[in-house]
């Protein structure tokens, strides 16, 4: 089912499009860092609770329900094939041959993988459902002709802070192994974090050319229209007596041809209309100097949401640094061993 923008005035609709893109990126990073299934499940429930207040629950559930089997399969791979040195054995899936051992670690981490995939996919759905296609394109399109160095300092400092904490919490041994004094090591890490933060900020802030932004805008808008067009053509063929899902393979190919040809023709006609509309608006003249009616601006709520994501990331990294990032697994193992 196509994911189309749903108009509304809920919490997610009021967020800046860049904030929702960063939420998706943040959830992807958290899905990598967080290894505890309960923590990952709580993140999924929190994100889902926010989503159902902005999008129709049935519509969201319909799209997510299709993915349950796929993500469950990924989880089964983790459950059946993960083996660590200190794995706590439970049983063999094929006992007579002693094949495929199932461990506590496999079960716990398989459950975490299930929530990881769902959290990332859910964040994508929420972004697409609550963000107009034009705003999505503007988030990654170059709009400003010039930026002052002072305007780049806040983003550079935030990125440098994230990189600095990431280096201390995940690369502590490498940092302490540097052949310098304590203060010198910290200064080196801070300097590298600032340089990398500035480079990332420049690359991310550069944006795509306006031509690519227009192409993405049309792409996002066309997906929903093609889905509706396909439904209309399918209903029209049904009304003419076509069985659109025959069991015979040859007949199914014939029916598929009867569906694809009008869809292809309709797509070509729409493409010609779009090209005429673009040329009539002078889009091909001095594209780099174009101005935009929409201006994306962060509000207080956007900064709060981004701060929460960064805080959750730091907490997850710190728990992993203390080697207590998976308390559920440790709790189950302690109960079994006692």
Image (cartoon, rainbow, N blue to C red):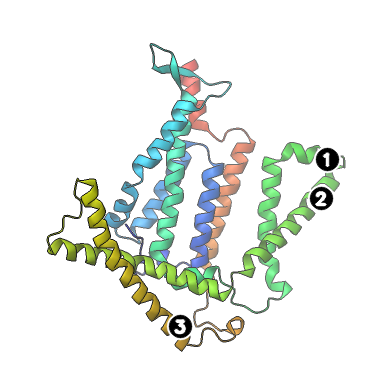
Q: Please report the residue visible at 36 percent of the width from the left and 61 percent of the height from the top.
A: 3
Instruction: State whether residue 106 appears in this view.
Output: yes
Using the numbered discs, state the Cα–Cα distance from disc 3 to disc 2 in whole angstroms: 51 Å
Q: Nearer the viewer, mark 1 or mark 3?
A: 3
**Residue 74: quarter of image:** top left
Q: How dense is the environment of label 3, judged by Cα within 10 Å: few (below 14), some, or many (20 and up)?
A: few
Q: Do the residues labelled 2 and 1 touch (CB within 8 Å)?
A: yes
Q: Which of marks 3 and 2 is nearer the N terminus?
A: 2
Q: Which of marks 2 and 1 is nearer the N terminus?
A: 1
Q: Residue 215 placed where, x, y %?
A: 49, 71
Using the numbered discs, state the Cα–Cα distance from disc 1 to disc 3 in whole angstroms: 57 Å
Mark 3 secondary-structure assignment = helix
* Label disc, if present, on residue 188 of the rendered structure: 2
Mark 1 secondary-structure assignment = loop
Mark 2 secondary-structure assignment = helix
Q: Please report the residue visible at 43 percent of the width from the left and 35 percent of the height from the top.
A: 75
Q: Please report the residue visible at 66 percent of the width from the left and 58 percent of the height from the top.
A: 159
* Label disc, if present, on residue 278 of the rendered structure: 3
Q: Residue 233 placed where, x, y %?
A: 23, 66
Q: What residue does disc 1 label?
A: 178
| Left/right of residue 249 with respect to residue 131 in the rendered view | left
From the viewer's side, name the closer residue of 260 and 226. 260
Q: How dense is the environment of label 1, judged by Cα within 10 Å: few (below 14), some, or many (20 and up)?
A: few
Instruction: State whether residue 11 appears in this view.
Output: no
Using the numbered discs, state the Cα–Cα distance from disc 2 to disc 1 in whole angstroms: 10 Å
Q: Residue 172 placed where, x, y %?
A: 73, 39
């Amino acid at each position: 089912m196509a994911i189309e923008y749903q108009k509304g005035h809920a919490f997610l609709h009021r967020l800046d499009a860049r904030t929702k893109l960063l939420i998706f990126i943040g959830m992807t990073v958290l899905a990598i860092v967080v290894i505890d299934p309960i923590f990952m499940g709580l993140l999924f429930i929190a994100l889902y609770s926010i989503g159902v207040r902005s999008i129709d629950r049935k519509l969201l559930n319909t799209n997510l329900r299709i993915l349950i089997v796929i993500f469950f399969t990924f989880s089964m791979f983790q459950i059946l094939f993960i083996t660590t040195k200190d794995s706590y054995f439970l049983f063999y899936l094929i006992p007579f041959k002693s094949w495929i051992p199932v461990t506590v670690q496999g079960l716990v981490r398989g459950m975490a993988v299930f929530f990881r995939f769902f959290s990332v996919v859910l964040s994508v759905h929420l972004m697409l459902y609550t963000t107009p296609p034009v705003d999505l394109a503007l988030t990654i399109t170059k709009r400003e002709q010039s930026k002052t160095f002072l305007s780049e300092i806040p983003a550079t400092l935030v990125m440098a802070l994230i990189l600095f904490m990431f280096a201390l919490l995940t690369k502590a041994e490498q940092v302490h192994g540097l052949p310098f004094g304590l203060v010198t090591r910290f200064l080196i890490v801070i300097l590298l974090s600032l340089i990398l933060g500035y480079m990332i900020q420049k690359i991310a802030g550069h944006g795509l050319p306006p031509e690519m932004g227009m192409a993405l805008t049309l792409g996002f808008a066309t997906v929903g229209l093609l889905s509706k067009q396909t439904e209309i053509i399918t209903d029209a063929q049904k009304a003419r007596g076509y069985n659109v899902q025959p069991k015979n393979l040859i007949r199914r190919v014939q029916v598929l041809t009867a569906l694809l040809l009008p869809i292809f023709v309709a797509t070509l006609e729409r493409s010609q209309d779009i090209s005429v509309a673009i040329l009539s608006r002078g889009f091909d003249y001095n594209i780099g100097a174009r101005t935009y009616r929409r201006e994306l601006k962060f509000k207080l709520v956007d900064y709060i949401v981004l701060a929460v994501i960064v805080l959750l990331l730091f907490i997850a990294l710190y728990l992993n640094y203390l080697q207590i990032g998976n308390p559920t697994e440790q709790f189950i193992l302690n109960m079994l061993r006692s």
